[in-house]
Amino acid sequence: MVDDNRRNGNFWALALERAHLGLWDWNLSTGDCYYSPTWSKMLGYEEGELANTPDLWLKLTHPDDRQ
């Protein structure tokens, strides 16, 4: 069993990376967004190529699909 002290951000980041799972997070209080490198790669973009903005989903959605 893994010691609870090891279950920090690095632990979960590594687990997500090894599982090839993308992750995004939006802090509603600050408006800050985070999109993991794997999330970007899943959409065909390089790490850091996309802006960490809350309207990114809308920008990436085809205009016909926005409604």
Image (cartoon, helix red, strand yellow):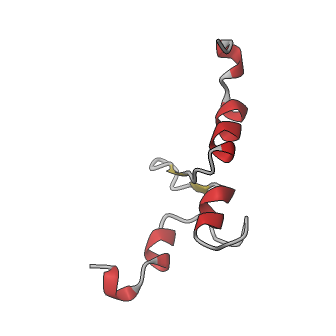
Left or right of 43? Residue 47 is: right
Query: At which x and y percent is residue 11?
Result: 69, 31
Q: Is residue 4 above or below residue 28?
A: above
For image coordinates 45% across by 50% down, the residue present is 28
Foreground residue among 19 and 11:
19
Foreground residue among 21 and 56:
21
For image coordinates 68% across by 12% down, the residue present is 3
Dividing the picture into quadrants, the one containing residue 2 is: top right
For image coordinates 67% across by 40% down, the residue present is 13
Query: In the picture, which quadrant includes the C terminus?
Result: bottom left
Identity of the residue furthest to the bottom in this view = 64
Left or right of 58? Residue 9 is: right
Query: At which x and y percent is residue 44?
Result: 63, 73
Left or right of 60? Residue 38 is: right
Query: In the picture, which quadrant includes the N terminus?
Result: top right
For image coordinates 47% across by 47% down, the residue present is 29
Foreground residue among 40 and 50:
40
Left or right of 33? Residue 45 is: right
Q: Is residue 19 above or below residue 57?
A: above
Dividing the picture into quadrants, the one containing residue 15 is: top right
Q: Is residue 37 above or below residue 27?
A: below
Identity of the residue furthest to the left in this view = 67
Query: At which x and y percent is residue 54?
Result: 49, 64
Foreground residue among 29 and 13:
13
Q: Is residue 38 above or below residue 15?
A: below
Q: How many marks?
A: 0
